Image: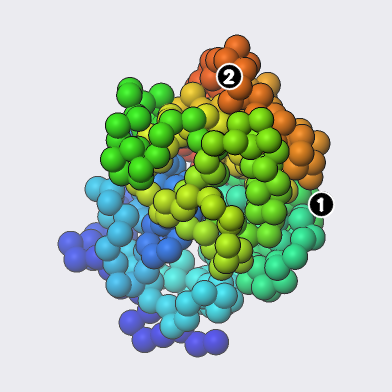
């Protein structure tokens, strides 16, 4: 695969020479492409926004340059950008990065490159840091993941070449050793954070009524509805709740995803929403129901707890690490137990209040500032500063 003409494009006002002169100061090049296109609305986009905000908060901004797609725009941070042009999109882009990114890095000459997803260079002329969100296509052998295994195959193979792998949870770090052969000495656990937007919202009821036609006390699900998220179990849990609270509605927020069932039997779909709207939805919900069968981290669980929304889910993968004792986690795959736990949150005020208090306290342990501090520490260990 050959590089495209005009392969590297500097942002206006940041010429090649200016960037080279900036190298007297250590220059960390961060892949910010997840802030562009559909990825910006997914977990990896949330991660990159949170990390960059945290790095700016701790005063690391003067050392950062952001890598973006050649068409530029998107990031939204007052940081220098460099653009790389790619011929391909989707799965092929991951393979193309593996072939040509090494040449990009030789031209750009950063002191360190941070790959914020599995779009990895086949070679790197500088220290390479990778954030590993999950290895779900290999860790969870469920339906519909063959395409994802093909899509992320180059990144998985190249992970072991990274100088440092930042796993978002202990569970993901264990997967990195077991499934990608990453040496323990190259692994660091750097949990994700939660945006300050996600906190108990004052009087959200009028806003969710006006915007979505909802009354407080509904069951809430946030995220895509692929097979791994077990939409059948979500419906089964809802049926279980309605056996004791027949008027409770199920609300689905977020992009449903390509594998979502065509019908969800009366559930209310609100689609993609802003962070502020999502915080209102969490704050007005009676309970978040999260039947995911495998997570690298589990951001919706953390966001719900931060907003004081009681949460129930399955005890698998990283979820016990995130939830602690603040959410009720039931045996993996037991949809009826999930429904009983959700019904208890709705119908037992003391149980609901206890979950609310514990969730808010637990969520305070996670911040993007802390994520940035741990990430900057990883950079420093490779840059020797």
Real-space Cα separation, disc 2 to disc 1, in angstroms: 38 Å
Residue drawn where x is 31% and y is 44% of the image:
211
- Residue 257, horizontal then vertical, whole percent: 54, 63
Residue drawn where x is 28% and y is 48% of the image:
77
Helix, strand or loop at disc 2? Answer: helix
Of pointers 2 and 1, the one earlier in the residue sequence: 1
Q: Is residue 71 left or right of residue 107?
A: left
Crowd class of label 1 (few under 14; some 14 to 19; many from 20; radius 10 Å): few
Q: Which residue is mark 1?
A: 178
Tell me the mark number nearer the camera, choosing from 2 and 1.
2
- Residue 334 lies, with reference to residue 58, above or below; the image says below
Q: Closest to the observer: 331 or 219?
A: 219
Which quadrant of the structure image shows residue 149?
bottom right
- Residue 336, horizontal then vertical, whole percent: 76, 39
- Residue 36 lies, with reference to residue 312, above or below; the image says below
Q: Is residue 52 visible?
A: no
Q: Is residue 328 visible?
A: yes
Q: Closest to the observer: 243 or 236?
A: 243
- Residue 15, horizontal then vertical, whole percent: 23, 65
- Residue 131, horizontal then vertical, whole percent: 57, 50
Image quarter where the N terminus lies is bottom right
Which quadrant of the structure image shows residue 357?
top right
Q: Which residue is mark 2?
A: 352
Which quadrant of the structure image shows residue 210?
top left
Q: Closest to the observer: 298 or 291?
A: 291
- Residue 366 lies, with reference to residue 213, above or below; the image says above
């Amino acid at each position: 695969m050959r590089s495209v003409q005009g392969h590297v494009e500097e942002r206006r006002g940041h010429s090649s020479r200016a960037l080279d002169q900036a190298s007297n100061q250590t220059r960390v090049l961060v892949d910010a492409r997840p802030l562009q296109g559909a990825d910006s609305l997914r977990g990896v986009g949330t991660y990159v926004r949170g990390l960059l905000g945290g790095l700016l908060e701790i005063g690391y901004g003067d050392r950062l340059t952001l890598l973006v797609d050649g068409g530029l725009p998107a990031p939204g941070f007052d940081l220098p950008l460099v653009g790389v042009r790619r011929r391909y999109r989707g799965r092929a882009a991951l393979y193309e990065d593996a072939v040509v990114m090494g040449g990009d890095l030789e031209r750009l000459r950063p002191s360190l490159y941070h790959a914020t997803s599995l779009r990895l260079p086949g070679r790197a002329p500088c220290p390479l840091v990778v954030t590993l969100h999950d290895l779900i296509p290999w860790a969870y052998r469920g339906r519909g993941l063959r395409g994802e295994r093909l899509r992320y195959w180059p990144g998985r193979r190249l992970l072991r070449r990274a100088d440092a792998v930042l796993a978002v949870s202990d569970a993901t770090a264990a997967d990195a050793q077991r499934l990608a052969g990453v040496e323990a000495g190259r692994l660091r656990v750097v949990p994700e954070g939660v945006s300050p937007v996600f906190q108990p919202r004052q009087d959200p009821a009028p806003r969710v009524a006006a915007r979505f036609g909802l009354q407080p006390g509904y069951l809430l699900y946030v995220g895509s509805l692929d097979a791994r998220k077990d939409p059948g179990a979500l419906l089964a849990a809802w049926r279980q709740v309605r056996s004791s609270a027949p008027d409770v509605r199920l609300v689905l927020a977020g992009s449903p995803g390509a594998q979502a069932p065509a019908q969800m039997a009366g559930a209310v779909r609100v689609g993609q929403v802003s962070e502020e709207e999502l915080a209102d939805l969490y704050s007005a919900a009676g309970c978040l129901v999260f039947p995911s069968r495998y997570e690298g981290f589990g951001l919706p669980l953390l966001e719900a707890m931060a907003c004081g929304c009681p949460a129930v889910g399955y005890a698998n993968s990283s979820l016990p690490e995130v939830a602690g004792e603040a959410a009720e986690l039931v045996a993996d795959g037991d949809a009826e137990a999930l429904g009983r736990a959700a019904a208890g949150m709705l119908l037992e005020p003391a149980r609901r209040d206890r979950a609310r208090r514990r969730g808010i306290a637990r969520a305070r342990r996670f911040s993007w500032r802390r994520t940035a501090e741990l990430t900057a520490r990883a950079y420093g260990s490779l840059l020797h500063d």
